[in-house]
Image: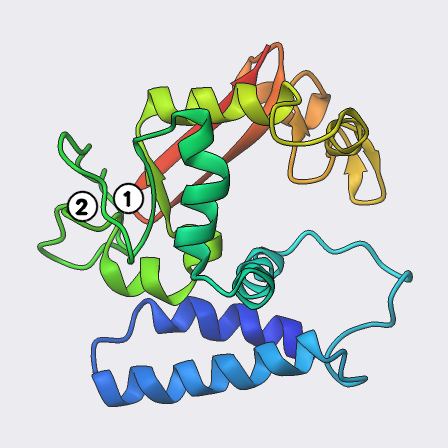
Amino acid sequence: QQAQDKLVAVSTQVATIGDEQQKQELLDQFNDLSAKVVERDPAATAPPGEKFYEDTTNYVLAGLVVEKVSGRSAAAAIDTDLWTPLGLERLVYQDEQTLPEPIAAPGEDEALPKGQTGRPYLPFRSLASAIAASHGVAGDAAAVAQWGYALYGGRVLTAESVAQLTDFDQEVGPGYGLATVDFTAPRWFQYHIEGHGIAGGSIGYRSVLAVY
């Protein structure tokens, strides 16, 4: 099994572990696998340029790159360089930051640990802290909408980069760009949205970001 696949499996497993020693062992394994992927270990993944991957692990690695390059935590770098200039006060990077009330309670989900209320970490701290760059950001609907219009409106990226995000003729299939989907494509028709963006969620929470 390739290192990237193992990395995803371990990152998911960490979120379900309550025993601190066992969790630390998994985190050590996660860090070792991350290093293999970052160093392009031949056994870690397929050679570059041969296959397109849309993988949650990529976001985890991106967070590590931000910290290495900036010399700051990912939370501090993203807050200072992106969210604050855009006036996005209700977007936070967990678990270094927490979202102030009001906070939506999680919906029914069999994977949600008993007694979790979504406060102060969404959906709960072990998941948010284990794979923060992938599942650790929390916010309210207004802030997410503002972020969407800033991202796709060219306030964060160049016009060329936005065009890449919204190029819906990727190898992964029609209607899918770079972490962006065309909701008008047949494969996304169930959303009944005349726009583009992304749909996703975490344990107990679901969300759709659409720009028209």
Q: Which residue is mark 1?
A: 204
Above or below — where is 104 with respect to 150?
A: below
Please state which of residues 76 and 183 is positioned toward the viewer in this rendering.
76
Q: Is residue 62 above or below residue 182?
A: below
**Distance (Cα) linking label 1 and label 2:** 9 Å
* Callout 1–callout 2 Cβ contact below 8 Å: yes
**Taking 182 as reference, is 157 above or below it?**
below
Residue 1 in view: no
Dot 1, how many residues are within 10 Å of its Cα: few (below 14), some (14-19), or many (20+)?
many
* Element marked by disc 1: loop
Which callout, 1 or 2, points at the residue further toward the start of the chain? Answer: 2
Could you tell me which residue is drawn at 55 percent across and 66 percent down?
A: 64
Q: Is residue 67 visible?
A: yes
Q: Quadrant of the C terminus?
A: top right
Estimate the x, y position of residue 79 in percent, counting from the top left. Answer: 41, 43
Please tell me the numbered disc located at residue 118. Answer: 2
Q: Amino acid at mark 2?
A: Gly
In the rendered image, which quarter is residue 32 located in?
bottom right
- Residue nearest the observer in this picture, 159 or 125: 159
- Per the image, label 2 sits on a secondary structure element best described as loop
Classify residue 153 by image quadrant: top right
Q: Kindly identify which numbered label has been placed on residue 176.
A: none
Q: Is residue 90 left or right of residue 211?
A: left
Identify which amino acid the numbered label 1 is placed on: Gly
Few, some or many residues within 10 Å of mark 2 (<14, 14–19, 20+): some
